[in-house]
Every structure is written in structure tokens, then in C-alpha cells.
Image (cartoon, rainbow, N blue to C red):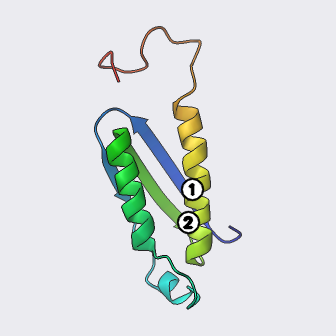
């Protein structure tokens, strides 16, 4: 994860949507030949995850070096974003939604 930086925002709203920034085409040239996964594989997984969870997710890749580090940064940031999105905020009353339900 040394050279990768990602930012993820999630909204568990019941309305699935996945938005990615484009990554540089040079990243794909940095993938070792023996790697059995692609960026498209990760995008497919994340789209399926978003659709089944009913969440809106924005993924911004701020800096990149190789696919392994990008994916590692994405999944670590996703874990942190999901943890924060599902925490109970004692300062709020009721459901944390402007529509009153999730």
C-alpha cells in the first residue's frame, strides 16, 4: 500500500450507486504477469456489494503505483468508511436520515 492513496465515502441509503475516479492506464502496465485479478474484477465485486447493500459509494484514487497497492488501499478505506457509517451517534435522535428511514 506504500504508493497508493484512496478516499471513500459511503451512504447507506437504500439507493445503490458506485462512482469511481478513473485510474491511469499506466497502472495496468505495472501489474505482474502472474497476477490472476484485474481492476475490472474489483469493480465488479464492489458494484455487486453496493447493489446488495443498497448503498451509495464514491471511490477516489488520489495516487497510484500498482494494482495490488490500489486494491489494498481501497479495501482498507472501505472498512474504515463502513465502520464510521454504521456507528451510533449519541448526539442524534432517531434514524440518521433526512427521510426518517434507511
On screen, 69 above or below 6?
A: below
Say which mark, if any, is on residue 6: none
Q: Is residue 26 left or right of residue 97?
A: right
**Quadrant including the N terminus:** bottom right
Instruction: Determine whether, in the image, residue 31 is placed left or right of residue 58.
Output: right
Residue beneath the point at 37% across and 21% down: 97
Residue 77, percent from left and from top:
59, 51
| Real-space Cα separation, disc 1 to disc 2, in angstroms | 6 Å
Residue 32 in the image, given as x and y percentages of width and height: 59, 88
Label 1 close to label 2 by CB (< 8 Å): yes
- Relative side of 2 to 83, left or right: right
Q: Residue at x 44, y 9 (%)?
A: 94
- At mark 2, the secondary structure is helix
Read off the residue under disc 2: 71
Residue furthest to the top: 93
Residue 39 horizontal side relative to residue 18, left or right: right
SS for callout 1:
helix
Residue 33, quarter of picture: bottom right
Q: 21 or 31: which is nearer to us?
A: 31
Along the line of sight, the residue nearer the viewer: 101 or 92: 101
Q: Residue at x 31, y 48 (%)?
A: 17
Quarter location, residue 3: bottom right
- Figure check: 83 above or below 36: above
> Which residue lies under the disc numbered 1?
75
Amino acid at each position: 500500500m506504500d504508493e497508493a492513496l484512496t478516499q471513500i465515502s459511503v451512504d447507506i441509503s437504500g439507493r445503490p450507486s458506485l462512482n469511481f475516479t478513473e485510474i491511469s492506464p499506466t497502472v495496468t502496465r505495472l501489474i505482474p504477469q502472474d497476477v490472476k485479478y484485474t481492476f475490472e474484477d474489483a469493480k465488479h465485486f464492489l458494484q455487486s456489494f453496493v447493489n446488495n447493500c443498497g448503498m451509495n459509494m464514491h471511490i477516489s484514487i488520489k495516487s497510484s503505483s500498482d494494482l495490488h497497492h490500489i486494491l489494498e488501499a481501497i479495501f482498507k478505506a472501505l472498512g474504515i468508511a463502513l465502520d464510521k457509517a454504521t456507528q451510533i451517534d449519541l448526539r442524534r435522535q432517531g434514524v440518521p436520515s433526512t427521510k426518517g428511514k434507511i
